């Protein structure tokens, strides 16, 4: 018979490194952190967007106060005017037929410049050390005048605001923000009604009344793309 021989091929296989096997196994089993990071970032961005939108649409007491103070430039200084010259006396020369020349003083603003009318108030300011008064005379075309001239002392100048040719403008007190007393928001109309108070105080010695007063005020806000604004 025919003899069958079995031929066995010797195949040499490359030996597998155990360290490489462990590394491949570890890499396949290592969870991927990239998707989780993206999810966290997305959640944070959405949260910031919602928070920003809430902060923009919400009108808190502190935000309303800041807008009111900025809008109305608070605190505001209130002032009074004290004219620089008061007429103490006047007379005219004697003319024809023994008649005295008629002399008058006229101001465009119709302020009474006669010293007698202002003497009580001026004396108080002198006693407080805020002003001084000196006299001067004027002779003009047969008319003669004696003037009481007001000057500010060093103490009085602490309350100086401005002056014109005829008068000093001096601080009497301040109007400052008090508190928010109510906020009513109408979301559909995107408007808010805010009530608040102002307080008059910080009086200067030029204020004879020494006011300590609370004033009630209200204002309307409207919501725009950039936030709340006070209506004109």
Image: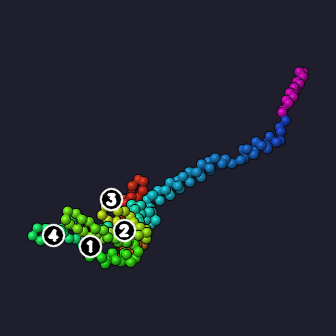
Which marked residue is nearer to the observer: mark 3 or mark 2? 2
Find residue 187 and report its horizontal and vertical position in percent. Answer: 38, 61
Q: Are marks 1 and 2 in contact (CB under 8 Å)?
A: no
| Element at label 2 | strand
| Residue on which disc 2 sits | 151
Element assignment for label 1: strand
Residue sitting farthest toward the left: 97
Rendered image: mark on residue 232 = 3
Residue 68: quadrant of the picture: bottom left
The tag earlier along the polypeptide, 4 or 2, is: 4
Q: Nearer the viewer, residue 95 or 172?
A: 95
Residue under numbered circle 4: 94
* Residue that protrudes farthest toward the top in the picture: 2
Q: Which one is in front, 102 or 189?
A: 102
- Front-lying residue, 187 or 74: 74
Instruction: Count numbered badges in the picture.
Output: 4
- Mark 1 to mark 2 CA distance (whole Å): 16 Å
- The rendered magenta stretch, by its main secondary structure, is classed as loop
Q: Earlier in the sequence, mark 1 or mark 3?
A: 1
* Extent of the magenta region: 1-14
Left or right: 116 as drawn, with respect to 229? left
Q: Are marks 1 and 4 in contact (CB under 8 Å)?
A: no
Instruction: Please name whichever residue, 102 or 107, is drawn nearer the observer in this view of the structure.
Output: 102
Q: Quadrant of residue 144?
A: bottom left
* Circle nearer the N terminus (4, 3): 4
The residue labelled by disc 1 is: 88
Residue at position x 37%, y 62% from top?
162
């Amino acid at each position: 018979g025919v003899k069958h021989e079995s031929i066995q091929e010797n195949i040499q296989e490359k030996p597998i490194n155990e360290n490489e096997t462990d590394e491949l196994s570890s890499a396949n089993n290592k969870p991927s952190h990239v998707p989780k990071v993206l999810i966290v970032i997305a959640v944070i961005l959405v949260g910031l967007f919602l928070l920003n939108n809430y902060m923009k649409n919400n009108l808190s007491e502190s935000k309303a106060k800041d807008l009111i103070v900025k809008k109305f430039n608070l605190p505001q200084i209130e002032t009074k005017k004290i004219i620089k010259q008061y007429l103490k006396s006047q007379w005219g020369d004697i003319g024809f037929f023994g008649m005295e020349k008629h002399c008058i003083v006229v101001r465009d603003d119709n302020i009474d410049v006669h010293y007698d009318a202002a003497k009580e108030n001026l004396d108080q300011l002198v006693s407080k050390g805020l002003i001084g008064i000196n006299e001067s005379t004027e002779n003009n075309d047969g008319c003669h005048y004696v003037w009481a001239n007001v000057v500010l002392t060093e103490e009085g100048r602490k309350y100086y605001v401005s002056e014109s040719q005829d008068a000093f403008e001096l601080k009497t007190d301040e109007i400052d923000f008090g508190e928010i007393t109510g906020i009513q928001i109408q979301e559909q109309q995107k408007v808010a009604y805010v009530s608040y108070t102002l307080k008059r105080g910080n009086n200067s010695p030029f204020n004879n009344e020494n006011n300590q007063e609370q004033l009630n005020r209200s204002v309307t806000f409207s919501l725009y793309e950039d936030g709340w604004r006070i209506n004109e």
